[in-house]
Every structure is written in structure tokens, then in C-alpha cells.
Amino acid sequence: MKQPMIALMTDFGTEDGYVGAMKGRLLSIAPTARIIDISHSITPFNIRQGAFCLNNSYPHFPDKTIFVGVVDPGVGTNRRGLIVKTSQHLFVGPDNGLFSYVFHREGYQTYAIENENLTGPVSPTFHGRDVFSQIAARLANGEPLAKLGSSVTAAYSFISKPDLKAQGSIELEVIHVDHFGNLIFNFTRNDWLESGANPDLKLVLNKQEFGPPVKTFGSVGDGKFSLNWDSSDFLQLVLNKGHAANKIGINTGHPATLQL
Amino acid sequence: MKQPMIALMTDFGTEDGYVGAMKGRLLSIAPTARIIDISHSITPFNIRQGAFCLNNSYPHFPDKTIFVGVVDPGVGTNRRGLIVKTSQHLFVGPDNGLFSYVFHREGYQTYAIENENLTGPVSPTFHGRDVFSQIAARLANGEPLAKLGSSVTAAYSFISKPDLKAQGSIELEVIHVDHFGNLIFNFTRNDWLESGANPDLKLVLNKQEFGPPVKTFGSVGDGKFSLNWDSSDFLQLVLNKGHAANKIGINTGHPATLQL
Amino acid sequence: MKQPMIALMTDFGTEDGYVGAMKGRLLSIAPTARIIDISHSITPFNIRQGAFCLNNSYPHFPDKTIFVGVVDPGVGTNRRGLIVKTSQHLFVGPDNGLFSYVFHREGYQTYAIENENLTGPVSPTFHGRDVFSQIAARLANGEPLAKLGSSVTAAYSFISKPDLKAQGSIELEVIHVDHFGNLIFNFTRNDWLESGANPDLKLVLNKQEFGPPVKTFGSVGDGKFSLNWDSSDFLQLVLNKGHAANKIGINTGHPATLQL
């Protein structure tokens, strides 16, 4: 028995039954599909957090996994619904930046979901159930992409790389604060190599200086700050056994300067 | 291989291992069952929230899905355990109103779970594991209903419909506040048709007037209120890209008046 | 088709995609495995809460279930990674006390995970993905324990039993506060039998006296305190339809005295 995998990420929480509705719909259309929860606790409407979460997860899934991502403040308006195809995976969700990291990292093709290809009524407030789950389940059933959407070229991405050729210092920002309070910056190990791989890199944040990167959280004492490379190779500032973001009192979007 | 589906909804949270215990028990009795999480974040003891969550989810699941619902402040007292059978689904849980919407929408038969039909010890504080999971798993294994419960006629429902024949206005209440802060009222699109389908319906809440319904959240500007029909066809008041309940400062149970 | 079961418990939350990464990795290595979520909402770094959660769950799972537990403040330092084998189950995770109850209740063998047995890069900040998920998936695929770890004798446990032979009274502590606010003590029904099974046992907490145990929450009126035996046979203090911990204002670690 074929068991296609469908992985879900939403900002719905679970307490209203919206996620249950999506799972029910998926299984009604694709009864043998295996449903895997990535998250339903993305902060409501926080597209960038959703994109970051997806970026940490999707590369590790088997080939042919279908991802449904729904963080969708524009549901029911004229924003497009997308199917994104890479060499390994398929992604279904709104064209609002949720797949920015996929576009940044992978070769891809994009298809706009066409209303006339959908079956059944479509609630203007719940495309997660009536559009994206339907499309994902039909992809899982092997329906060809061309029956579900039409090829389009541009899709929205919010990612802008820092200026790696800047002299002396690079302006960064906090792109994510994780569950443990770690502050993650828009600068990867590859960016570091590209910028010259200065082993003494230092980060200045709120006039405090941190760095260079160490191996892991516990490389410094309890309650001490350190820089390291996170598990997706982003630069992060952490507080050993503490919550760096609360301790410093900053959040996503805060600027920082990397000294080379 | 037969893979019966069992969908779970509880107010347990997951951090104590109670949900894990239920899943383990289900899989020990019905090893091929597929377990689908609807929610474990119903507010503790909030039967009405659980009923609402289940109502948003169950209609979309495949035939023969077995739902286990546990929001059960009366566990271990003499409240009955129920099996509810509809033309499509089975429901297992306490007889405390958790299945009110099922009773409201479906034809159904109810069976009281009889202690003498249970195997193994039963903790008086954890029927979710020792009674409801056991019954659901045995149903999944194909045991006949008559071996597990005895037919009963009355089951508790908390739903009372608004007076749709009232002249001029209908008294409603907020029955649910969802994850996004949307305020949902006990008035459906069908109720609207039944009451005369006035296209200019207006809702008065805290002396503010809202309406008539628009298509979706983004039909009005950011930070603006609007009425629309939610994805289960209830009337809802929403704040585009905001949290209506917090903004207005009200919660479940708050009255409102619908002007026709 | 063989469908080994892998049950997950972490303190990761789901919103950063770390759990998604683990699931993806597990399914990439062991594509037919069934992944069951126990919890991802253990309080960050709270090893004792994780151990308690696992203790409530694992005994109910089918034979051969593989548990991956990750509450791991020491990730990337020289704390060991463990595989624990009991007569029924396998456990994979850090050697930091997370499996204390397993050691307390079961016969077991322990194996230290050896770096040279791992394949692929290992992030020093994410052993949940690169070490423990890899090991669990390879166990699910049937790889022998001896290929993955080397037998070791000592493993860390934080459990110390109360002095059951004390005269007149036994000093206890709150070992867990659950989702409902129930206060759970390090004293089981077996401890009670061992200490003489006094039917009139009374608990003194903050100079208030509670007991003897009753059957269930609703054995006393709404808003009343009572003692009972929880579903894993620990003594607990509960507030019927309320939150005992908030009402009394205490948390894990608080002392109490049991009078015999």
C-alpha cells in the first residue's frame, strides 16, 4: 500500500478544531496518506516565523513529502495559492513569503492554484481546509500538477541577504527567537565563508560584544552568553540554561553588527 | 492491512504523559489503528469549547472514524460513559454535553458503557485511558457495540437554539472565542435562512453595531471589524489582522442582539 | 509491511521546526516507522518533568516501542547519549536522569552511544536530530544494539525513595504539578503498603492537613481539596474543578509531611 507523506504547519493552534478539519479532509481524499505534524503553534499571522520553522524541518524529510503550510492573514482575498515543486519535495500554501527559504535554497517551479480546478465548496475564510488540503491530498493521490495549477514565474520572498562585501562590518538582524530564547541572525556559516571566514568574528548587539562562536551551549558556564552556529547553520546568540531574548529584552527584527 | 482511524481530543495538555498513556493503550489493544490528534489543548474542564472543536472537525473525517473525546470534570463519579453512533462515525466519551453538536446535527444512537464489559483495572481518575481508549480500540478491532454498551435513549446536550421567530431582533450569545480572537455566535447561515434571510442583518454588541456580513477577513482594512460566516457557517465577528475578543474585552457567554 | 513504533518526547515546542526536523530524519532513515507524539511541551530543560511524563506514558505502549526522549540542557558537552533496553521497550536519549523512572521500575541494560557508530554530520547543538533520531531509526530498522553503542553499567537517576521506615511521619515532596494543577508526591500506593498501609494517612502541607485519600476528584464538592491515588498510583492533592497548585501557591519541590 502506497503511503504518501503529508506534513502540516499552521498558525491555527489546535483548540478550535481547524487542524482536525484539515486532517479529516486530507484523509477523506487520500485515505492512505500519513499525516505528520510539524507545528500548529506558529504565532498567528507570523509568516516569517512559519517560514523559519519550515526551513528547519523540510530538508530532513524523505523525497516526495508534500508540505502544507498555512499562515495566511490574506485568506479569501486575491493573494494566490501556490504549489511549489523542488527536486525532492512539494509545498502547498499561500503566496505570501511562507516558502521564502525554499526559494532561497532550492531550484523550484511554482504553480498558481486555479479555482476552476477545485472540487466542492470553498469557504472564503478557510483555504487551509478547502483549498490547500484538497490540493495536497490530490497530489498525494498522484494527480498531475498541470491538472491543479498553472505554471507561474514569480513568487513572493521576503529574504534579503546581508551585504557580505561590506568593509569592516556587516549589518544583521534577529530573524527568529526560538522556544529556548536563542536569538538567530540572518547570517549563515556559508555567509561567513563567503565574507572571508574571519575566525575572530564578533557580534555587537545593544552595545554589548559577543563572540567568537563556540561549539555548543554548554561550552560556557551556566548563565553565560555565547555565539554558536545553530543546527541549520545560522549564527545564534544563546544563554546557557537561560533565555537570551528575555535576558537582553529584545525580539525579532532587532539590529546587530557583525565585526570582521 | 486494515487501519482503522481513531481521532483524539482532550483537555489534558501533553506535558504530563496522559495523552501518551492513551495512545499507548490504544495501540496496545488495536496495533494497526492510526491515531490522529485533533487537540489536547482544550481549556481544562471546558466542555463547550471541546464540543465546538469537535464540531469543526468531525464532519470532515472519513466514514468509520472513531472519535475519542475527553473533557471530563466528572471522571469517576456516576456520570455515564457513552458510545454514540451516527451513520458515518463513532464517538466515545463522557455524557456531559461534549457531543452536543453531534446530537444537534446528526441522527444517532447512544449506548452507555457498562463497567462489566471492561477488561483490566480502571483508575477512577483516568477513564480516558482505562475506559474510553479501551472501548475505542475494541470498536476499532471490530467488536460489536452490543458487547460494549447498552442502548440508552437520552444523552445530555447543552445546545438551545435562539428564538428565530422573534420579532425584530434575536438574542444571541458568544459561544466560542477562537485562537485568532474571532467571536463566534450561536447563529448559523441556516438559522439566517430560517429567520427570513434579511441581507441587512446587523449585530449589536456592547452598544456597537456591526454588519452586514462580508466575504472574508480581508474584505475590510487592517484593524477593522467585520461580520462573516465562519467555515462551519456560524456568524462571527472578526478584526482583520487583530484579536477581536481582546480588543472588545469580552469572552464566551457575552450577549449580543441580532437586528433583522 | 513492518511498522515499528517510535514515540517522541521533547522540550522543543513545535514552533521552530526542531521537532519537524527530527520527524523528517526518522522517516528518511526508517520510512515505514510510525511516529507517535507523546509531548513537545515539556518545560525547557526540565528533566524531572520529562521523566515524569515518560513514566506516565511508556508502560502502556506495545512491546518493542522505541522511545526518543530529548530534554537535554547539556547537548554537545561530554554527557553521554544512552540506549536503554528493558524487556519490553527501548529508550534513546541523554544520560541526565530523563530515564530515572525506567531505571526505578524495570530491569534494564544500558548502552552508551558511540560517535564512531554515527553516520553523517552531527550538529553540536542538535543531538535530538543527528544522534538520537538516527539511533532510534536504525534500531527501528533492526540494527543490533552492539553496532550502535557499547554496554555500560551506571546511568544517572535522580530518584531517591522517601524513608518508609520512619516513625510516625514520612517527609515527602511535590515531584510534579500537572496540567490541571494537581500536586503529585513521591509516595505511591506500593510505598503506602510497604509503610504499613495506614488507612487514615494524612498529609500536612503548609500547616494544612489533608486526607485520607478518597476515590476521585468529584468525591468531594466543587472547590474542595482531597487526596487520591493518581492514575500511576502516586499520591496526589487535588482541588475539584480547580487548580490546587495556584490555589495553595506552591510548586515542584515543596515539602510535605505524611502522618501515619
Image (cartoon, coloured by chain):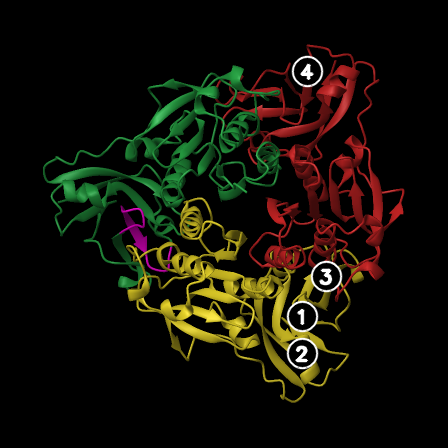
Chain colours: A green, B red, C yellow
* Chain for disc number 4: B
According to the picture, the residue beneath numbered tag 1 turns out to be: C233
Front residue of B241 and B15: B15
According to the picture, the residue beneath numbered tag 4 turns out to be: B202
Both marks 2 and 1 on one chain: yes
Disc 4 residue type (three-letter): Lys
* Chain for disc number 1: C
| Residue span colored magenta | A229-242
Mark 3 is surrounded, within 10 Å at the Cα level, by few (under 14), some (14 to 19) or many (20 or more) other residues, namely many
Q: Nearer the viewer, mark 4 or mark 3?
A: 3
Of the numbered discs 2 and 1, the one sitting upstream in the chain is 2
Q: Are marks 4 and 3 in contact (CB under 8 Å)?
A: no
C-alpha separation, residue under disc 3 versus residue under disc 1: 10 Å
| Res B117 → quadrant | bottom right
According to the picture, the residue beneath numbered tag 3 turns out to be: B125
Mark 4 is surrounded, within 10 Å at the Cα level, by few (under 14), some (14 to 19) or many (20 or more) other residues, namely some
C-alpha separation, residue under disc 2 versus residue under disc 4: 63 Å
According to the picture, the residue beneath numbered tag 2 turns out to be: C190
Does B177 sit left or right of A65 as displayed? right
Disc 2 residue type (three-letter): Asn
Q: Are marks 2 and 1 in contact (CB under 8 Å)?
A: yes
Q: Quadrant of the C terminus of chain A?
A: top left
| Res C64 → quadrant | bottom right
C-alpha separation, residue under disc 2 versus residue under disc 3: 18 Å
Disc 1 residue type (three-letter): Asp
Front residue of B131 and A63: A63
Q: Is residue A86 above or below residue A36?
A: above
